[in-house]
Amino acid sequence: MALYSEKVMDHFKNPRNVGVIENADGIGEVGNAKCGDIMKMYLKIDDDVISDVKFETFGCASAIASSSMATELIKGRPVSEALQLTNKAVAEALDGLPAYKMHCSVLAEEAIQSALEDYYSRHPEKKQ
Amino acid sequence: MRIYADNAATTKMSRAAIDAMVDCMESHYGNPSSLYELGQEAKERLEQARADIAAVIHAEPGEIYFTSGGSEADNQAIRSGAAIGKKSGRRHIISTAFEHHAVLHTLKKLEEEGFEITLLPVHEDGLVRVEELEAAIRDDTCLVTIMFANNEIGTIQPIRELGAVCKARGVLFHTDAVQAVGHQPIDVKADNIDLLSSSAHKFHGPKGVGFLYARKGVRLTNLIEGGAQEKGKRAGTENLAGAAGMAAALREVAGHMAENAAHMSALRDRLIAGLAEIPHSALNGDAKKRLPGNVNFCFEGIEGESLLLLLDERGICASSGSACTSGSLDPSHVLLAIGRVHDVAHGSLRLTIGEDATEEEIDYIVRNVKEVVEYLRGFSPVWRDLTSGKTPFIL
């Protein structure tokens, strides 16, 4: 049996939404190099909808795949939905992760939440 | 195309080893303990394998004990050294910070049982210092265990000198030579070795078999009870096919050791030179005092498992000391022991080439590692911070 699901390998080998958004409306960075995983998410938000999202990740295959999948799950969705994104949803969308790699999906959730917090700190009026 | 560059993990079995095993399984299935001819034929094969192995490391056949592999040999050697020490009230054992876990975990157990363990530091070049061993030996030291060559970074320790220090102080000296046997000349007498562990699958023999050399007079402690096999020191019907396969494999590599080493070290140096062209990278361990097939690099700004899996896509089998490949949060204890910080140790790559490696393969590896490292750095936030000057480069 392979280490990872086909979905994980697909998102690892062909990551979606890789890169940087200049003048992003929210940026979140989580993890640390000491532990071997860092994720950085860039959000573009128009009319309370995530119109664009990009990521940069330092980490293992499941960290890269989790970042990629997380961006796919929130792209084009309302901010209110992105706020509800859980690590479980990311892992399920990837057809599962090995137990000791679940923290990668947690990082993806946290990176998005952190980017949204950054957005709200810049636009406190949007926070309800 | 598949390039197998993980020979420190395991090796492909040689034809000689396979043939020897098949012959044993087909024609010599008797139990070596049985008295009839079929059994005694098997016994002869077993003793021939023992003699062949002994000859390669300049030991006596009676000093070779078959085991299930390197881990068992390490466990038994260390347990034996500890038991001998305990008898005379000596409960101090010296080892190093970068041993294989078969050694480190056994020492941990002994510590719980009341032994005191000193782990010598390993320097940035991946080598242990003889004078540091000398200074660490105490009156109650019963055993020193230091690996012959490191499994991750391939550095070859000054075994003869370390052994001489132990001999002068009357301390037993064990070496985990799993990575060295068949690849480095070993003379247990001249090298002052009392106990030595080895594993067949690291030199093109089968998995699940190895041996422990114990100098005549060094009393072994049993790990497995139940029979008179191996002079009563290792019970269980002997793995004759395994022992014969191991002996055949070892005879073959030992017969070509010098030419293999010359061929492999030239390719190793070509690989090191090629990878060193990658900016902000560093070779781990001394460039010359290392196994002829071992190359181990750290690349700043990337993580090893991603590198490994993308190389696999390109047909290259390698390994990494990153946390993600070890199944824990910490990267390789070997890389940490030689002073690599966590951030850098996560981005390590070990390539261990075999005797049949070619220049074309080396160039293919260099080209692909360069491409994959560049690709991964392209979307690494760590690399972005390094290149933008936000954080300083380490390498």
Image: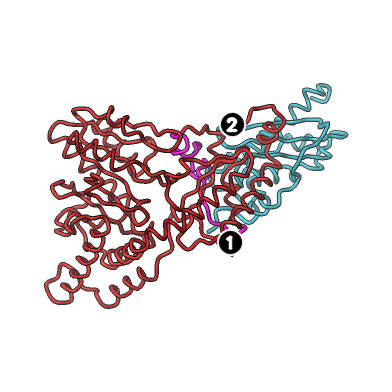
Chain colours: A cyan, B red
Say left or right for B29 vs B315: left
Residue B275 got which mark?
Answer: none
Is residue A13 positioned above or below B15 on the image? above
Is residue A120 positioned above or below B199 on the image? above
What element does badge 1 sit on? helix
Magenta residues span B314-338
Question: Which residue is at 59% across, 44% downward?
Answer: B276
Residue A31: where, in percent of width, then height? 62, 32
What element does badge 2 sit on? loop
- Residue at the disc numbered 1: B360
Question: Which residue is at 51% across, 59% downward?
Answer: B4
Based on the picture, tell me whether residue B207 belongs to the magenta stretch: no
Question: Which residue is at 14% across, 70% downward?
Answer: B34
Q: How crowded is the residue under tag 2: few (<14 C-alpha within 10 Å), some, or many (20+)?
A: some
- Between marks 1 and 2 in the image, the one whose residue lies nearer the viewer: 1
Say left or right for A85 vs B52: right
The foreground one among A4 and B358 is B358
Question: In the image, what residue type sits under mark 1?
Answer: Glu
Q: How crowded is the residue under tag 1: few (<14 C-alpha within 10 Å), some, or many (20+)?
A: few
Residue A2: where, in percent of width, then height? 55, 57
The foreground one among B132 and B210 is B132
- Residue at the disc numbered 2: B394
Residue B382: quarter of image: top right
Q: How many marks?
A: 2
Say left or right for B63 vs B286: left
Question: In the image, what residue type sits under mark 2?
Answer: Ile
Based on the picture, tell me whether residue B325 belongs to the magenta stretch: yes
Output the chain of dot 2.
B
**Distance between the alpha carbons at the discs numbered 1 and 2:** 32 Å
